[in-house]
Image (tube, grey):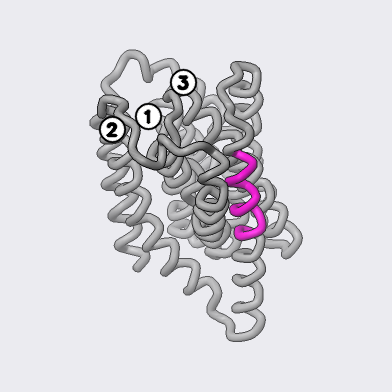
Amino acid sequence: MDFSLIAIGLFVGFLVGLTGVGGAALLTPILIMLGIQPTIAVGTDLVYNSITKIFGAIQHWRQRTVHWQIALYFAIGSVPSAVVAVNLIQWVEHTFGGADTLIKKVLGFALILIPIAMIAKTVLHKREPRPNRWQLCGLKEKRTLTISTGAVLGFIVGLTSIGSGSLFALALMYFFNLQGKEVVGTDIAHAFFLVTAAGLAHASFGTVDYPIVLQLLFGSVPGVFIGSILSTRVPTRFLQYTISMIILISGLKLI
């Protein structure tokens, strides 16, 4: 039992419960900085993420805050794309070597993109809901766009384990005229399918450290609970921006 991993799970879970942002974007670089092989860090984070997402997905399903058709269209693009990304990592490693270096570089760029997405999501959320031209279109008209967006973002998640929440939430807010609770519910439900598929792909190649997953969960479950309780008592906007800056700096270091 490694209590440092439990403490990391507690810390990340606490921040996610408190602010709602930064889970995978914080955890994966932390695991790499601890000396865990990048491929293992990504696969482990995806499996850990899948387990944590299932509880949120079930709750939002019960609350009827999931737009299943949008989640399905995203998944049609994102799930196979993420699996292709995982297989690409393995192909690069077996053919050329240096897959870990590739992951670190791509992860660095993704970590720069995530804070921008977080800030953009906050700005969009604060605006008065005035539908743009995409939001005024019907879902069938946006089917190809939704699947294509899922494919692009799913590939990023498959390579780096991050973005299943913030990047897809930003896409939901920009392309669809949904209520805030529907954005969160649809995002979490789709993310569960995406990270589960990518996690299983990593598991098939043996790039998941299950003891690490278990120890992170020991810390993160109470961490999310404590953070959620305190989220109504402390100003979280400043913390969200602070976490965004930490993630941005982590990305620059990895590049």
Neighbourhood count class around disc 2 (C-alpha, 10 Å): few under 14, some 14–19, many 20 upward? some
Residue marked by disc 2: 239
Contact between marks 2 and 1 (CB within 8 A): the answer is: yes
Of labels 1 and 3, earlier in sequence is 1
The boundaries of the magenta stretch are: 71-82
Q: Quadrant of residue 58?
A: top right
Type of the residue with mark 2: Leu
Q: Which residue is mark 3?
A: 226
How many C-alpha atoms fall within 10 Å of the one at disc 1: few (<14), some, or many (≥20)? many
Of circles 2 and 3, the one toward us is 2
Tag 2 and tag 3, C-beta contact below 8 Å: no
Q: Which mark is residue 231?
A: none
Is the residue 220 above or below the residue 145 in the image?
A: above
Which of 11/122 is in front?
122
**Quarter of the image that includes the C terminus:** bottom left
Instruction: State the SS at label 3.
Output: helix
| Structural distance between the alpha carbons of marks 1 and 3 | 12 Å
User: In the shown orientation, is residue 43 left or right of residue 180?
Assistant: right
As drawn, 38 above or below 60: below
Q: Position of residue 114 (x, y in %)?
A: 37, 50
